[in-house]
Amino acid sequence: MVCIPEVFEMNPERESFNEKVVLPFETSVELFVKREDVLHSEISGNKFRKLKYNLQEAKRLGFNKLLTFGGAYSNHIAAVAAAGKAFGFETIGIIRGDELVDKFMENETLRLAFENGMRFEFVSRTAYRNKTSEDFLEQLKAKFGDFYLIPEGGTNAFAVKGCEEILTEADANFDYLCCAIGTGGTISGIVNSAFENQKVLGFPALKESFLQDEIPLFSHKNNWELIRDYHFGGYAKTTTELIDFVNDFNQNQSFKIEPVYTGKMFYGLFDMIRNNYFKPNSKILAVHTGGLQGLNSKILQK
């Protein structure tokens, strides 16, 4: 039996902070990054925020086992495994793509999750689409026993509550707030906590049609917009142009990004600033959502 502390607290190793981004061209626009990637060495960035209240709820309900879903490059999978190890939960990951069953150790994200104790169940892409169906979840309960369910990407009301804590009073002077998007939980929290007259821009990391309907489930504000021009073909898809940008960025800035989420957002922001999307003298705050294990992935290789 896994022993979970009687009093459950999930505190960051370090508080996030804002840092100016060096732009390689002349502009009056200022770009800053909120360094959420420093919150925890393994429970990275927005995943720390998303898991905080979910783990509190799992503890409150008496669960000692977490089950969740994700793909091969899922920051969420890596974070849940790390959180399980750190806070005494068993973890099970239902992974999209049964072709990975014999080669998951070649994938940095899955290898880290496995080394942190996560048990994997690899399923076909067809079966994975049933991840929210009651029949499929009952089959998983029959196989693994009772568990606390965390949705794909960690997005639910508890996750959004955690992401509402990303912004602080010091962020009120920014005109735009930006983040990369997977399942929509992080941007929903930012939308809810944004200050008056701030515009929230979300950069989907995948080809999608669901986010426009998903975000209003968690937020009733209309202060946000999706920027869909920088997904580079879909989730974990890249081009030589994107890889060159990420490598150049990491050589010239004081912090690093990766090509699955933050790389696409910063590529988009540089392009939009260069092409005068933003009014002169605008101040932009981009949230660094972590996930830097993606830097070790083969997708960074040309």
Image (cartoon, grey):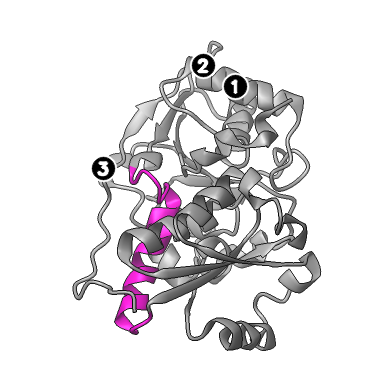
Task: Please report whichever mark, 1 or 3, sits nearer to the chain's N-terminal start.
Answer: 3
- Under mark 2, the amino acid is Gln
- Residue 82 % position (x, y): 41, 55
Which is nearer the eye, 225 or 262? 262
CB atoms at circles 2 and 1 under 8 Å apart?
A: yes
- Under mark 3, the amino acid is Arg
Residue shown at 46% from the left, 23% from the top: 281
Which is nearer the eye, 16 or 243? 243
Instruction: Give the quarter of the figure containing the N terminus.
Output: bottom left
What residue would you read off at disc 2?
251
Left or right: 11 in relation to 261:
left
Prevailing secondary structure of the magenta residues: helix
- Under mark 1, the amino acid is Asn
Circle 3 SS class: loop
What residue would you read off at disc 1?
247
Left or right: 6 in relation to 138:
left
Over which residues does the magenta segment extend? 39-63
Residue shown at 52% from the left, 44% from the top: 179
Which is nearer the eye, 8 or 283? 8
Q: Is residue 50 magenta?
A: yes
Vertically, is 224 above or below 299? below
Circle 1 SS class: helix
